[in-house]
Amino acid sequence: MRLSHFDFLAPATIEEAVGLLQSKGADARLMAGGTDLLMKIKLGAIKPGFIISLKKIGGLDQISFDPTTGLTIGATALLADVADHPDILKHYPTVAQAARGTANVQVRNMGTVIGNLCNASPASDNAPTLLAMEAVLHIAGPEGKRKLPLDQFFKGPGMTALKPSEIVTAVGVPVLPPNAGTAYISLSARGKLDCTAVGAAVMVTMSGDVCKDIRLFVASCGPTPLRAVKAEEIIRGKQISDDLLAQAGSQASQESRPITDLRASGEYRTKMISVLTERVITEASKKARG
Amino acid sequence: MKQVIKLSVNGDPYTVAVDPCQTLNEVLREELNLTGVKLGCGSGDCGACTVHVDGRAVSSCLTLAVEMDGKEILTAEGLAPSGETLHPIQEAFIDKGAIQCGFCTCGMEMSALNLLQKNPSPTETEIREAISGNLCRCTGYTKIVEAISAAGEKMREGDR
């Protein structure tokens, strides 16, 4: 498996990178870690004439936390650094958990969270938790900068709301509300290394035993990570009970559109969505109550 | 068009003209003849091609050589630079019978080093997690896990 020929460009600024994307058009592909992009080229799925690396752009690998504005993860910050970052472990442990659960050690030392998002796989490990926490993408393009809530980003497998010549420069996660708890559980055939077959991520905001607010996302069970809106409605504003959890789990299964593929059967996924929904809400509400 | 990169491999400086579509694996094996670096799956799943770049274990099959300008590379050959005294990890792999066909060994050792440098006394679970990106089709992993644990002990004693 050799790579087909391309020219390699490593701009020093975002503006330069946007300019290159504009001049090279559809023949150019952006690269952060390259673990997904180079595989697509090796498999012949794409044959770009130009690769534009983001790695020489200063500051793009930064991870920063501010107690008022929250967390910012730059486009070339490595999965391994997100998984080990002290502020992320302290304030966003589920974000670290998802990064640590992505692929293997070697890939985490090369790949990036943003790359995982932009690849737009329905099985992305990093999308569900960030969606649950209302993450926002920072985007730069020919018309300047804009922000886009992550829940408006995914349009289908490999498809995003990015316009031509736009670059995701960072993902921001707001400070979590007081008494919020998060949880993410994913299942795969081997448990390590292989792609998630079914997963669920949630953020709940509690007031005692009552769930004030909830954001629940199901992974790998539709063309994009799916928000289980009706399942949320069952829980929101109520005191969490076993009966309510069972109803929410069943509803989340009904809202999903799992297919059968080599990772799992549709039937298995449907059943597991229900189980995982109950488990993540239970875990997150426990964490929220400290 | 080829680009000239300067890099350090196992402590030695190299200047190489590389094609942008050449991987680090191709350059190490084919230009520098460092064939301890294997090519298995070519897709970042098997770990046979694992090398360290600036102290981090990566899959050389998914790393572009052109991006290695100014980087420090360590391959299994660099574990025992003199060729006479083996690294404690290599000694432990031999002592514990952790090598059968040998194809995965160099990659396994690089992943072991990546772990032991950060965590000199790992638990069995930590070892198994650390090598979850390295496939072995001979040993069943038990001997490899034992070897990495023993290597950790040796390295702590020798403080290497």
Image: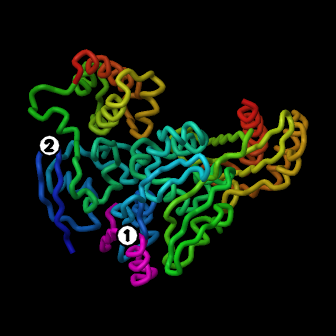
Q: Which residue is mark 1?
A: A13
Q: Quadrant of the N terminus of chain A?
A: bottom left
Query: Residue B151's image quarter?
Result: top left
Chain assignment, label 1? A
Q: Which residues are magenta?
A: A1-29
Classify A147 as above or below B78: below
Badge 1 element: loop
Coordinates of residue A150 in the picture (x, y in percent): 64, 61
Residue drawn at point x = 44 percent, y = 71 percent: A46
Coordinates of residue B120 in the picture (x, y in percent): 35, 24
Classify A151 as above or below A52: above
Report the front residue among A287 and B147. A287
Q: Reply yes or no: does residue B5 show up in magenta.
A: no
Residue drawn at point x = 26 percent, y = 21 percent: B155
Chain assignment, label 2? B
Badge 2 element: loop
Classify A138 as above or below B26: below
Locate residue B14 relative to residue A176 in the image: left or right: left
Q: Residues within 10 Å of mark 2 (few under 14, many from 20)?
A: few
Q: Residue furthest bottom?
A: A23
Report the front residue among B128 and B8. B8
Type of amino acid at the residue the image marks with label 2: Gly
Q: Nearer the viewer, mark 1 or mark 2?
A: 1
Q: Residues within 10 Å of mark 1 (few under 14, many from 20)?
A: some
Type of amino acid at the residue the image marks with label 1: Thr
Locate residue A235 relative to residue A32 in the image: left or right: right
Q: Is residue A262 at least partly visible in the picture?
A: no
What mark, if any, has residue B11 been given in the picture?
Answer: 2
